[in-house]
Image (tube, rainbow, N blue to C red):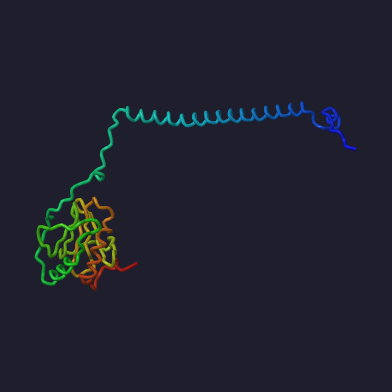
Amino acid sequence: MDRMPDSPTTAASRGGTNPDDENADLRDETDAVDGSARGGRDRSNRGAALIATAVAIPVTVLAGVLAFTRLAPDQSAPEPNASATPQVQSTAAVEMAAPTLAERPATVCRALLSQLPPTIRDLPQRPVTAGPEQNAAYGDPALTVACGGAAPTFAATDKLWLVNRVCWYGHEEGDGTVLSTVDRETTVTVRVPDGYDQPLQWVSPVAETIVATVPSTDDAPSGCLPG
């Protein structure tokens, strides 16, 4: 025989769920969800407020520092950086002396000058007022190369520098550094203005040409030997 469907009362009496109870559970769950959402929004709002406060404090301090800097007495404005201002590079002839050379040094110097590069790093070559067969100049202010001058004098304890197989003695003179070869039969002198950092780097291209054109001596100082 077919069974009749249970009534709501019978289903409840058999351990089923009362529809009213189900509705109550749904309301509780809805309240719980709403509460979580509201709590999440509240926590988010509080977190955003804390972050805004944390950001506002250093910004306020920075604004105070800037205001003090602008208003502080005896506070002068920084000088403009001269290196950042483009400067017109002179192409005029550079004044250089041209002492009379003996035949052998004159021949060596002509060979050197004929092989010097047209630029040294980013400095273009410029004309000279005298002795183009023994003098050269580059850039503005001018870095100069003089061949055939007097050999430098220095103490045995003075520092010597070996750059690209050429040995140099250097000293400060006026507003530049003067570097002279001490291991070549004909002296080559390079003057590097103070505005150019690390003078030894500027003689590197010249050293390569010196090796190819100026013979070395047999009595080079001991400090010129590779370490």
Q: Position of residue 30 (x, y in %)?
A: 67, 28
Q: Position of residue 123 (x, y in %)?
A: 22, 56
**Quarter of the image with the N terminus in it:** top right
82, above or below 76, in the image: below
Q: Nearer the viewer, residue 116 or 68?
A: 116
29, above or below 211, in the image: above
> What residue do we see at 70% from left, 30% from top?
29
> What residue do we see at 70% from left, 27% from top?
27
Q: Position of residue 205 (x, y in %)?
A: 25, 63
Q: Where is residue 31 in the image (x, y as percent from the top left)?
A: 67, 27
> What residue do we see at 30% from left, 31% from top?
75
**Quarter of the image with the C terminus in it:** bottom left
Q: Nearer the viewer, residue 176 or 59?
A: 59
> What residue do we see at 12% from left, 62% from top?
132
Q: In this view, does 146 lie to the left or right of 121?
A: left
Q: In this view, does 109 lie to the left or right of 65?
A: left
Q: What is the quadrant of residue 81 in the picture?
A: top left
Outermost residue toward the front in this view: 1
